[in-house]
Image (tube, rainbow, N blue to C red):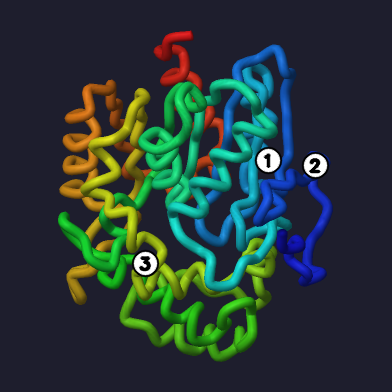
């Protein structure tokens, strides 16, 4: 088992942090709410840590027993060089549900965490997962070789390439000033918008090797979305936030296009499960963090439709 990330960059938060030994990794997490309430598992986006859900956790705790985790390579969970893949992330969560949650759970993930929510619906152990909320999940648009629409290199990939080049695996380069210069000069609006004079806290807690494996396509090499999505086994809610096409480059702005959302829904519905879709084009990508009241309202309304 590897140790939690050794970089001394972490800060206190409103909920106590706990660690679960999953074998290969230590998974960091926080809890809110009462154990007699239905269980919910929250999975953050790439570069995110559990504490991006803090306010959403407080609101959800009125009705749910909430767990929010750090995936390997993020937050206080273990960093595992050369071991970042969708299947490894997913199997960490299978172990977490089995060892910590210990009962059927509603899963809600944002961005790549939303892809992992779908992965859990498809591949987790029987009766572990009740339903999944895929919050602005980049179906197809996070793949290097995709069957539908823009690939990662026509979407968030150029930003990830900058992380790879200027930050380096495990921050071995760490040239934030060089990153800022390159991001400011980038042809990609997403990269130009992802700048800050000081390194943001969530980036300090993130292993940039994540970015490299998405840019190079190895993260999902054995988990094509075209194959995963028809294997979901639970009800699904896909929320779809701000999106558009850059008129200068033709690249995707946002997590997934309308074409990709429609294809994802069609494939999941082919599995015979109920798939709900919530279009919120005025919402930011990380709605759960920047408009938690709206996020929780969407979550609650959908969860009320689920069978016990």
Q: Check disc 2 and report the residue beneath it.
A: 14
Residue carrying label 1: 54
Taking depth in this image into account, of 259 and 306 the one nearest to the observer is 306
User: Callout 1: helix, strand or loop?
Assistant: helix
- Of the image marks 3 and 1, the number of the one nearer the N terminus: 1
> Answer yes or no: do the residues labelled 2 and 1 have beta carbons within 8 Å?
yes
Position of the N terminus, as image quadrant, is bottom right
Q: Quadrant of residue 140?
A: bottom left
Residue at the outermost top position: 308
> Does residue 126 sit above or below 182 in this rendering?
above
| Residue 263 coordinates in the image, percent (x, y) | 17, 43
Residue drawn 49% across the image and 47% down it: 90
Q: Distance of mark 2 from mark 1, alpha carbons?
A: 7 Å
Tell me which residue sits at (64%, 44%) in the image. 69
Q: Label 2 crowding class (10 Å Cα cut-off): few <14, some 14-19, many 20+?
A: few
Can you identify the residue that label 3 sits on? Answer: 156
**Residue at 30% across, 62% down:** 143
């Amino acid at each position: 088992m590897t140790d939690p990330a050794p970089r001394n960059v972490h800060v206190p938060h409103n909920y106590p942090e706990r660690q679960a030994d999953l074998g290969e990794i230590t998974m960091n997490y926080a809890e809110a709410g009462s154990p007699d309430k239905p269980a919910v598992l929250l999975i953050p986006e790439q570069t995110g840590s559990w504490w991006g859900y803090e306010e959403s956790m407080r609101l959800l705790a009125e009705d749910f027993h909430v767990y929010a985790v750090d995936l390997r390579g993020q937050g206080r969970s273990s960093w595992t060089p050369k071991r970042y893949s969708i299947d490894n992330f997913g199997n960490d969560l299978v172990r977490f549900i089995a060892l910590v949650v210990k009962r059927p759970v509603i899963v809600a993930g944002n961005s790549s965490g939303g892809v992992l929510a779908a992965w859990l619906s498809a591949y987790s152990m029987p009766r572990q997962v009740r339903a999944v909320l895929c919050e602005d999940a980049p179906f197809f648009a996070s793949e290097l070789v995709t069957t539908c629409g823009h690939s990662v290199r026509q979407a968030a990939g150029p930003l990830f390439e900058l992380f790879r080049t200027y930050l380096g695996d495990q921050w071995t380069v760490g040239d934030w000033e060089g990153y800022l210069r390159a991001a400011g000069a980038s042809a990609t609006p997403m990269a130009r918008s992802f700048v800050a004079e000081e390194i943001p806290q969530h980036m300090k807690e993130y292993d940039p090797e994540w970015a490299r494996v998405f840019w190079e396509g190895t993260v999902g090499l054995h988990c094509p979305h075209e194959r995963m999505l028809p294997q979901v086994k639970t009800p699904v809610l896909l929320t779809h936030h701000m999106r558009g096409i850059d008129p200068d480059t033709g690249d995707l702005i946002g997590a997934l296009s309308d074409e990709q959302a429609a294809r994802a829904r069609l494939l999941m519905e082919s599995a015979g499960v109920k798939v709900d879709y919530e279009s919120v084009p005025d919402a930011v990508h990380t709605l759960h963090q920047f408009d938690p009241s709206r996020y929780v309202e969407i979550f609650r309304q959908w969860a009320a439709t689920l069978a016990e």
